[in-house]
């Protein structure tokens, strides 16, 4: 039997926990929490209302709290941190990987952060402070300083003896970083080459390929694209002078990809900041009210256009019945193009060199689909209302609206990006307005000319 999907496992854990909280014993709840991975406990906490979340958090073992906190969404993590005293917060930082520790420290009150830093040995504190100097959404903020570096003028045998003396390798180590005497990055040597090549060969000659280093200032989203395109497990990070600072590993990049996907998905509905499903009612209402207000303005614009043709609608009631079809078909077609283009922009696949060809292609798709579905809807309307001219009018309106939707869906994201506006946030609202206005004006305008 195949393993259940992660979503199904998460739901099973949630149902089991809720059942134990209602009908089980405290020992059973503790036993369940002790059996789960910190990421699974984080998912449970995000799935619980605030009261139950606080209760479960109080049962989480202290040694698991740090790894759980760095996994939680910001809106869920912040209230939990506020509930913890100084000793609990300091204890939560113990045992964290340095990159996770840096992320965690950025959310702590300054006095506690300073206390934690003072408790570290000088060398470790310098590493943490260096990473804290970089914004968390850059390569410097993502990196870990646990990279093993070797000089190019020593032999592979010396490296092997050093690794045996060291006793262990950092997680996700697939290669060693090669540097010169000044610490400047030269390339990598893979573990496979280290084990299979002549032990007497200098490290500099064993560099299989000059993997391009990632600047510490590079945005995290660009780092994720590099890892995706090159199928990397780890990559070196350097400063402006080319000196090796550390490395980024695939586990941190996966987090970036997930967060970016969540952000884009929520942004489409104006909910990018509402990562807590059980956020306070007033806060959620305030955020959504702004979005609803914007949509109200666009809806009023569409209603205003309909008002132009009030007399036409009064004379032919069938128009009121059929108007939603025209607007809906245009909205769906435009959303398909809009989603495609926004994704292409996010992946860096659309620019000035190919934008025009993409627009022409989408216009052709809109025209073809418009022709097909205009004929289908026309036949349905003729059979429904027994009016040939009404069928021809709605067919023309659908064809025009689908072409307009394709044009708007292809051009809006590019225009918004040029204006410095997030296409995922504003694109869908503007697109809906365009397809509604064009659809209503075309349908009711043609009806006014040919039917009334």
Image (cartoon, rainbow, N blue to C red):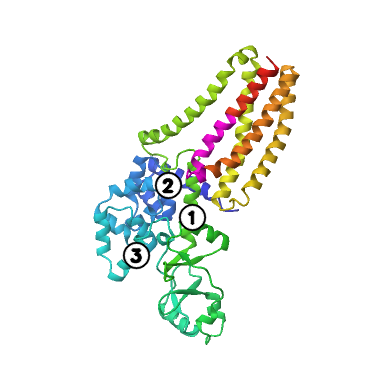
Circle 3 residues within 10 Å: few <14, some 14–19, many ≥20? some
Residue 114's image quarter?
Answer: bottom left
The secondary element bearing badge 2 is classed as: helix
Compared with 431, 384 (above or below) is above
The secondary element bearing badge 1 is classed as: helix
Q: Position of residue 423 (x, y in %)?
A: 51, 43
Q: CA distance from mark 2 to mark 3?
A: 34 Å
Q: Position of residue 167 (x, y in %)?
A: 42, 77
Q: CA distance from mark 3 to mark 1?
A: 21 Å
The residue under label 3 is 130
Judging depth in this view, the residue of 80 and 132 nearest the camera is: 132
The secondary element bearing badge 3 is classed as: helix
Q: Is residue 432 magenta?
A: yes
For marks 2 and 3 on the same chain, the one whose residue lies earlier in the sequence: 2
Q: Position of residue 268 (x, y in %)?
A: 50, 40
Report the side of 351 relative to 387 (left or right). Answer: left
Q: Tell me where the magenta segment starts and ends, as one range.
A: 416-436
The residue under label 2 is 44
Label 2 vs label 3, nearer the camera = 3
Report the residue at 44% width, 52% height from top.
40
The residue under label 1 is 221
Judging depth in this view, the residue of 180 and 44 nearest the camera is: 180
Task: Specify whether residue 10 is in view.
Answer: yes
Circle 2 residues within 10 Å: few <14, some 14–19, many ≥20? many
Q: CA distance from mark 1 to mark 2?
A: 27 Å
For the stretch drawn in magenta, what is the main secondary structure? helix
Compared with 320, 357 (above or below) is below
Q: Position of residue 56 (x, y in %)?
A: 35, 46
Disc marking residue 303: none
Report the side of 413 relative to 394 (left or right). Answer: left
């Amino acid at each position: 039997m195949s393993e259940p999907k992660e979503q199904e496992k998460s739901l099973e854990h949630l149902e089991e926990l809720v059942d134990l909280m209602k009908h089980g014993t405290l020992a059973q709840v503790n036993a369940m929490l002790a059996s789960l991975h910190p990421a699974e406990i984080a998912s449970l906490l995000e799935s619980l209302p605030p009261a139950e979340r606080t209760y479960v958090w109080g049962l989480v073992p202290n040694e698991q709290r740090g790894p759980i906190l760095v996994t939680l969404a910001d809106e869920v993590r912040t209230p939990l941190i506020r509930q913890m005293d100084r000793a609990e917060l300091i204890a939560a930082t113990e045992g964290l990987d340095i990159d996770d520790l840096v992320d965690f420290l950025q959310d702590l009150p300054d006095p506690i952060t300073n206390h934690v830093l003072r408790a570290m040995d000088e060398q470790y504190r310098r590493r943490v402070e260096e990473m804290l100097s970089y914004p968390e959404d850059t390569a410097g903020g993502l990196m870990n300083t646990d990279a093993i570096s070797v000089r190019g003028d020593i032999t592979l045998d010396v490296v092997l003896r050093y690794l045996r003396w060291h006793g262990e390798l950092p997680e996700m180590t697939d290669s060693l970083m090669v540097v010169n005497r000044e610490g400047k990055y030269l390339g990598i040597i893979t573990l496979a080459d280290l084990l299979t090549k002549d032990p007497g060969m200098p490290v500099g000659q064993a560099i299989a390929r000059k993997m391009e280093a990632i600047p510490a200032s590079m945005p995290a989203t660009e780092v994720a694209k590099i890892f995706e395109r090159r199928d990397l497990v780890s990559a070196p990070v350097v400063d402006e002078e080319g000196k090796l600072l550390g490395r980024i590993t695939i586990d941190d990049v996966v987090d970036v990809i997930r967060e970016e996907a969540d952000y884009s998905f929520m942004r489409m509905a104006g909910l990018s900041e509402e990562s807590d499903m059980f956020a306070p009612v007033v806060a959620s209402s305030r955020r959504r009210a702004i979005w609803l207000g914007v949509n109200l303005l666009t809806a009023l614009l569409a209603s205003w256009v309909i008002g132009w043709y009030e007399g036409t609608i009064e004379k032919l009631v069938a128009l009121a019945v059929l108007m939603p079809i025209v607007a809906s078909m245009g909205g769906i077609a435009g959303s398909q193009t809009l989603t495609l283009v926004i994704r292409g922009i996010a992946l860096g696949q659309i620019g000035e060199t190919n934008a025009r060809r993409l627009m022409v292609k989408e216009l052709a798709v809109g025209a073809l689909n418009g022709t097909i579905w205009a004929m289908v809807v026309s036949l349905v309307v003729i059979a429904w209302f027994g009016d040939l001219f009404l069928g021809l009018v709605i067919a023309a309106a659908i064809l025009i609206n689908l072409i307009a939707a394709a044009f708007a869906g292809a051009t809006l994201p590019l225009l918004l990006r040029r204006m410095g506006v997030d296409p995922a946030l504003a694109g869908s609202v503007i697109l809906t307005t365009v397809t509604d206005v064009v659809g209503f004006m075309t349908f009711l305008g043609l009806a006014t000319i040919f039917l009334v």
